[in-house]
């Protein structure tokens, strides 16, 4: 059995006060199929309640009225803290958050509220660029796991954004190319479970990317395209509990055999915007040096 993930016990979530479909920037969005605001809020509250019942802490920020996708807090930025050694070396060492530079301009106003909110929590905001200068980076494309940050690029993030992320974190970033339009962020096709296990959907990636991910994961739970499109990989893990929006029976059997508990929550109203449980939650407890080794100057490795 793999070692439990250290991170995943503290999350940012954004209240769905203004969640609606004003535009279509992914295959799930349809302006003629609006979410029920009361059911969406109830589903969001249920998720928050389950996370807290499992022992996680949830920090809540308010959603901007002009940012209907802000409820998907995972994409606000990649927050991290320095390891103990770095903190000892420098009294000024503190948490930072690499703010997402969104591919679509419809989402860029989210930063105006998210950056000062992160700052109030003790994370210094870092920008990688504006209007494509410095690259595009959306935090739903990045996971801190094993010896690197595993990061997707293609539909939303790009290689330049991944390079900037590696430099800011001072870690290795392993880039894999996403090619499936329905899995436009990495968190729709990849979910770390513990130190050796992860859900992976090879159909989301080009051949080098799929091969690289399967080689990286000692014990992969390989998802079919149909399974992944239920949003089952867009889950969070708190200790040994996997909180999921859907769990196909084959996936459930494997998770239970590995010793995980499974909690399934109805999230269909939030799916109308193209995201689910992972998209709604942003981990705030990633520590460089504990959760991923530091690399001087950072290092980007792209699967070719």
Image: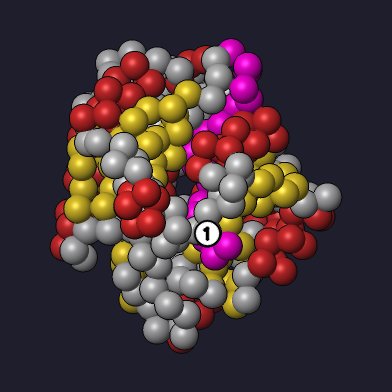
Q: Residue at x 32, y 70 (%)?
A: 239
How many neighbours does mark 1 have within 10 angstroms: few (below 14), some (14-19), or many (20 or more)?
some
Q: Residue at x 29, y 32 (%)?
A: 118
Q: Pick whichever, 69 or 83, lies toward us.
A: 83
Q: Residue at x 17, y 57 (%)?
A: 52
Residue 71 coordinates in the image, percent (x, y): 33, 33
Q: Is residue 240 above or below residue 226?
A: below
The answer to whether residue 206 shows anywhere in this view is yes
Q: Is residue 61 above or below residue 87?
A: above
Q: Is residue 34 left or right of residue 61?
A: right
Q: Is residue 265 left or right of residue 189?
A: left
Residue lying at the far front of the rendered structure: 89
Magenta segment boundaries in residue numbering: 131-147
Q: Is residue 128 above or below residue 301?
A: above
Residue 72 coordinates in the image, percent (x, y): 38, 36
List the residue tagged with mark 1: 293
Callout 1: helix, strand or loop? loop
132 in the magenta segment = yes
Q: Pick whichever, 285 or 227, lies toward us.
A: 285
Q: Quadrant of residue 270?
A: top left
């Amino acid at each position: 059995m793999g070692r439990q993930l250290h991170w995943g016990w503290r999350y940012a979530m954004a209240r769905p006060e203004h969640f609606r479909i004003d535009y279509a920037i992914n295959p799930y969005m349809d302006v003629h199929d609006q979410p029920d605001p009361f059911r969406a809020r109830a589903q969001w509250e249920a998720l928050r309640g389950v996370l807290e019942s499992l022992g996680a802490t949830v920090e809540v920020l308010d959603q901007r009225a002009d940012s209907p996708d802000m409820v998907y807090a995972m994409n606000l930025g990649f927050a991290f803290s320095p390891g103990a050694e770095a903190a000892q070396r420098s009294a000024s060492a503190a948490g930072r958050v690499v703010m997402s530079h969104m591919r679509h301009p419809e989402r860029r106003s989210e930063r105006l509220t998210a950056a000062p909110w992160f700052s109030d929590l003790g994370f210094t905001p870092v920008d990688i660029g504006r209007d494509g200068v410095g690259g595009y980076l959306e935090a739903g494309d990045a996971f801190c796991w094993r010896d690197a940050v595993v990061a997707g690029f293609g539909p939303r993030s790009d290689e330049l954004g991944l390079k900037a992320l590696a430099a800011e974190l001072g870690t290795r970033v392993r880039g894999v190319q996403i090619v499936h339009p329905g899995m436009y962020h990495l968190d729709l096709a990849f979910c770390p479970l513990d130190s050796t296990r992860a859900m992976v959907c090879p159909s989301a990636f080009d051949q080098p990317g799929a091969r690289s991910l399967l080689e990286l994961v000692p014990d992969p739970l390989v998802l079919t395209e149909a399974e992944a499109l239920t949003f089952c990989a867009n889950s969070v893990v708190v200790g040994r509990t996997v909180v999921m929006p859907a769990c196909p029976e084959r996936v459930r059997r494997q998770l239970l055999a590995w010793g995980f508990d499974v909690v399934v929550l109805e999230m269909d109203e939030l799916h109308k915007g193209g995201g689910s449980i992972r998209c709604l939650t942003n981990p705030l407890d990633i520590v460089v040096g504990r959760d991923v080794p530091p690399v001087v100057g950072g290092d980007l490795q792209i699967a070719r």
